[in-house]
Image: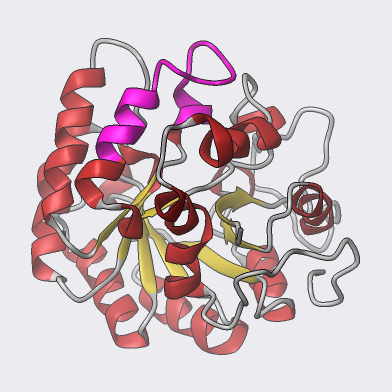
C-alpha cells in the first residue's frame, strides 16, 4: 500500500549555511535532517513526504526547505511558510515556486497571527492560485474559523489542506473544535490532515481518546479528502507517540475500510502532490534523489 507522509518538519545540521532564528525550538537530542527523515521513512515503507517549513526553528527563512525541494522534485513536496504581514511575501512565494519547485504555501493569520480575514492573507492566497499550487491552512484556534471560512468561500478552486484539524485534543474545547471541523467539511476544496492523534492524545499509543474524532472527520470529509501526516521529528512534536505508532493507527488500528486506508495513507496525496509515484512504490534507503 502506498504511504505518503503529508506533514514532516526538517532541520539542517549545517547551521552556518542555514542559520536558525533567535531562540530556536530544537529537537531533543538533535537530528531531524532530510537524511534522518529518509531513514525513518524507509524503515516504515513511506514513499514520499510533504516537508513543512519549520518556523519555530528558521522563522520565515525557507532556504533549507527550498534547497531540499529543488534537489528532490519527485519525493519531497515543499510547503513554505511566509509572513503575510511582510509585503514582499507574494514575490518570495513566486520565486520559491518557480526557482525551487515548492508546491504549497502554509498560510498563517496576519497581523502577528490574529486573523485570516485580512488583505495580506488574501494576497498570498491569490498568488498561490495564480501559481497553481495548494495551501496548508494553520487554523488552530476557534476564533480564527470565521475568517478562514470567508477565505474558503472566496477561493473555491484553491485546494487547501487543514493542518491538525484545529489542534484537536481532549479537553474543554474538544467538542466545540470537533463541531467546527465537521462544519468546515462543507467546503469541497478543504482536505483534512488527520494527523492530530499523535499531537493531541493524552494517553500515547494507540491514542484512542481521539479515534472518535478521526472517524467522524473521515466520515464527514470522505477518505478521498483526508491525508495522513507523521508530525516528524516525533521526539519534539509527538513525544507520546513514535512515527511507527502513529502510522500503525491508520494502517491497522482504526476500523477503516481497505479502500479508505488507501486513500488516507497515500492515494489522496498522490493525486494532489505526487502524480508520478506508482502505487507500489516504497523508498529505497539510499534513494539518490533525496538529499540536500
**For residue 257, side relative to residue 63 (left or right):** left
Residue at horizontal 61 percent and vertical 58 percent from the top: 1
What is the x, y in percent for residue 21? 64, 47
**Camera-side residue of 129 and 18:** 129
**In the rendering, at what x and y percent does residue 280 appear?**
66, 69
Q: Judge whether residue 114 can be spotted in this image.
A: no
Asked if residue 216 shows in the view, the reply is: yes
In this rendering, the answer to whether 42 lies above or below 268 is: above
Q: Quadrant of the C terminus?
A: bottom right
Q: Is residue 123 magenta?
A: no
In this rendering, position of residue 161 left or right of residue 249: left
Q: Position of residue 36 (x, y in %)?
A: 83, 50
- Asked where in the image residue 274 lies, by quadrant, the reply is bottom right
Asked whether residue 198 is drawn in magenta, I would say yes
Residues rendered magenta in the picture: 197-217
- Most extreme residue toward the front, as rendered? 258
Tell me the residue at 25%/73% (across/down): 158
Residue at x 15% of width, y 30% of height: 179
Q: How is the image coloured?
A: secondary structure
Q: Is residue 39 left or right of residue 7?
A: right
Decide which of 219, 98 is in the foreground and name it. 219
Picture quadrant of residue 73: bottom right
Residue drawn where x is 73% and y is 34% of the image = 27
Going by the image, does 108 lie left or right of 74?
left
Q: Position of residue 19 (x, y in %)?
A: 74, 54
Q: How many marks?
A: 0
Amino acid at each position: 500500500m502506498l504511504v505518503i507522509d503529508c506533514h514532516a518538519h526538517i532541520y539542517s545540521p549545517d547551521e552556518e549555511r542555514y542559520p536558525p532564528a533567535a531562540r530556536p525550538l530544537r529537537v531533543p537530542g538533535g537530528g531531524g535532517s532530510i537524511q534522518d527523515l529518509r531513514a525513518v521513512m524507509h524503515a516504515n515503507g513511506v514513499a514520499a513526504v510533504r516537508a513543512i517549513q519549520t518556523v519555530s526553528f528558521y522563522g520565515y527563512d525557507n532556504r533549507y526547505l527550498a534547497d531540499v525541494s529543488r534537489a528532490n522534485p519527485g519525493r519531497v513536496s515543499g510547503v513554505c511558510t511566509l509572513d503575510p504581514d511582510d509585503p514582499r511575501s507574494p514575490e518570495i512565494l513566486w520565486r520559491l515556486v518557480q526557482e525551487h519547485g515548492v508546491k504549497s504555501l502554509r498560510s498563517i493569520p496576519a497581523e502577528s497571527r490574529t486573523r485570516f480575514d485580512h488583505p495580506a492573507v488574501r494576497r498570498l492566497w491569490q498568488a498561490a492560485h495564480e501559481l497553481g499550487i495548494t495551501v496548508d491552512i494553520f487554523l488552530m484556534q476557534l476564533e480564527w474559523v470565521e475568517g478562514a471560512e470567508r477565505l474558503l468561500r472566496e477561493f473555491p478552486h484553491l485546494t487547501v489542506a487543514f493542518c491538525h484539524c484545529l489542534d484537536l485534543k481532549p479537553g474543554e474545547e474538544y467538542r466545540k473544535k470537533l463541531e467546527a471541523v465537521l462544519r468546515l467539511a462543507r467546503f469541497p476544496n478543504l482536505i483534512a490532515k488527520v494527523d492530530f492523534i499523535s499531537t493531541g492524545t493524552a494517553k500515547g499509543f494507540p491514542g484512542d481518546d481521539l479515534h472518535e474524532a478521526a472517524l467522524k472527520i473521515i466520515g464527514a470529509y470522505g477518505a478521498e479528502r483526508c491525508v495522513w501526516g507523521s508530525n516528524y521529528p516525533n521526539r519534539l512534536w509527538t513525544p507520546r507517540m513514535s512515527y511507527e505508532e502513529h502510522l500503525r493507527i491508520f494502517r491497522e488500528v482504526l476500523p477503516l475500510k481497505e479502500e479508505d486506508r488507501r486513500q488516507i495513507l497515500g492515494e489522496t496525496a498522490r493525486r494532489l502532490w505526487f502524480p508520478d509515484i506508482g502505487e507500489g512504490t516504497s523508498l529505497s534507503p539510499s534513494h539518490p534523489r533525496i538529499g540536500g
